[in-house]
Amino acid sequence: MSSINKALRSGAVRKDTYERLVCVDCDTRLVTQDRGGVGWRRACPSCGREWKQIR
């Protein structure tokens, strides 16, 4: 699981016009899940890939 910043730079995730994170492969908005502790887990509901996001 890589970070959101790395995914944005590599092109696996993009931001739409409202600055929401979108999976490039599925064109689906990412959902947020609590990781417990520091940060969140961002996941694509279609393909199941996950990225971590630190506060």
Image: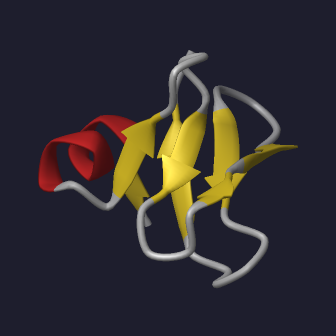
Please state the total of marks drawn on the protein image.
0
The picture quadrant where one finds residue 28 is bottom right
Figure check: 5 above or below 41: above
Q: Nearer the viewer, residue 40 or 36?
A: 40
User: Where is residue 16 shown, x and y percent of the image?
Assistant: 51, 31
Residue at 67% x, 48% y is 41
Q: Nearer the viewer, residue 31 or 16?
A: 16
User: Where is residue 37 shown, x and y percent of the image?
Assistant: 75, 30
Q: Nearer the viewer, residue 49 or 40?
A: 49
Residue at 65% x, 26% y is 38
Figure check: 52 above or below 45: above
Furthest-bottom residue in this view: 47
Q: Nearer the viewer, residue 34 or 44?
A: 44
Furthest-left residue in this view: 10
Residue at 15% x, 42% y is 9
Figure check: 28 above or below 41: below
Q: Quadrant of the C terminus?
A: top right
Residue at 15% x, 55% y is 10
User: Where is residue 48 shown, x and y percent of the image?
Assistant: 67, 80
Judge left or right: residue 35 versus residue 43: right
Figure check: 48 above or below 43: below
Judge left or right: residue 25 versus residue 41: left
Q: Quadrant of the N terminus?
A: bottom left
User: Where is residue 30 shown, x and y percent of the image?
Assistant: 68, 50
The picture quadrant where one finds residue 44 is bottom right
